[in-house]
Image (spheres, rainbow, N blue to C red):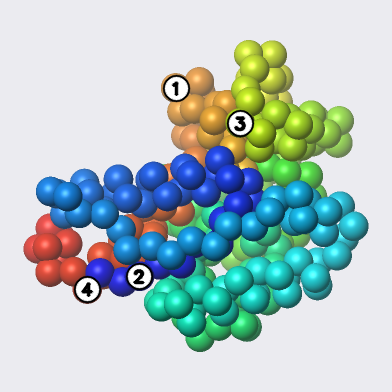
Amino acid sequence: MRTLGLLGGMAWPSTLAAYRAINEGVAARLGGTHSAPLLIWSADFAEVVGLQTAGAWEEAGALLADAARRLEVAGAEGLLLCTNTMHRVAGAIETAVTVPLLHIADATAAAVRADGLTRVGLLGTRLTMEGGFYRERLADHGLEALVPAAADRDVVDRVIYQELVQGRTSERSRQEYLRIIAGLLDRGAQGVIAGCTEIELLVTADDLAVAYYPTTRLHAEAAVAWILEDHPVAQRDR
C-alpha cells in the first residue's frame, strides 16, 4: 500500500471524518484487520482562520506548503488536504513537494459527471462559494456550480464557523440549509455538493430527493483507490 499524508486540523472534525472514512474504505476492500498507512499533520485552526480572515493567502499557502514538505520527508507518497476551503492554496502545496496532491474538487467532479449531471448547487464557506478556485476547477470538468444568494451565503458560512467546526449541530440550522438548497434546485441545480466537510454533519443524502455529493466521502474514496493502487488484493478485486 502507498502511504498517504493528511493535511488536517481545518477543522478537526473534518480530519476525523476523513481519517475514519479512509480506514473504513481500506478495511472494506482488504478485509481482516487492514487499515490505511497514514501520516497526519494537524493545524491549529484558529491560526488558519486568522489568515483567512486577513486575506493572508500567501502566508496560509506557506504554512501548508511547509507542512506538506514535512509529510513528504516523513515518508508520504501522496497528500490529501482534509478541507475544501484551503484548496485555494493547492498550488502552493503542489509546488512545494514532488508527490501528488489528491484534489477534492477533482474527486467530486468525477462523481457528478458519472451521474450525467452538468449543473449543481455548491454549499461551503463563503470563500469556497465566492472564490473562483473551486468553481473554476469544477468548470474544468464541464460542470456549472450555482451558489446561494448573498444573504443565504452569510447563513451557510455562519453556521459552518459558529456551529459545525465546533462539532455542534441544530435542527434550526438544518432547516435553514434545506431551505437554501430548495432555492438552488428551483434555479436549476440537478444535485448538491456539500463543499465543506462539516456540512455532512448537518445534511445527509436522506434529507434530499436529488443527488447529494458529500465531498469528504468522495475524497476518501479517491484516497482509498490511490492507496491500494499497487496492492495485490485490491487488484484482484477489480
Disc ID at residue 167: 3
- Mark 2 or mark 4: name the one nearer the start of the chain: 2
How many numbered marks does the figure carry?
4
Name the amino acid type tagged 4: Asp
Residue type at mark 2?
Thr
Q: Which badge, 1 or 4, is on the more N-terminal residue?
A: 1
Residue 37 image point, x, y percent: 32, 63
Q: Are marks 2 and 1 in contact (CB under 8 Å)?
A: no
Mark 2 vs 4: CB contact within 8 A: no
Q: Earlier in the sequence, mark 3 or mark 1?
A: 3
Q: Which image quadrant: the N terminus?
A: bottom left
Say which residue label 2 marks. 3
Residue at 39 percent across and 58 percent down: it is: 222
Residue 204, given in percent of the width and then of the height, sits at 49, 27
Residue type, mark 1 in image: Asp
Foreground residue among 51 and 103:
51
Rendered-image quadrant of the C terminus: bottom left
**Closer-to-camera residue (82/122):** 82
Q: CA distance from mark 3 to mark 1?
A: 20 Å
* Residue linked to disc 4: 230
Local secondary structure at mark 3:
loop
Closer to viewer: mark 3 or mark 1: 3
Q: Residue 27 appears at what percent x and percent y?
A: 22, 49
Q: Earlier in the sequence, mark 4 or mark 3?
A: 3
Identify residue for label 1.
206
Visible residue check, residue 113? no
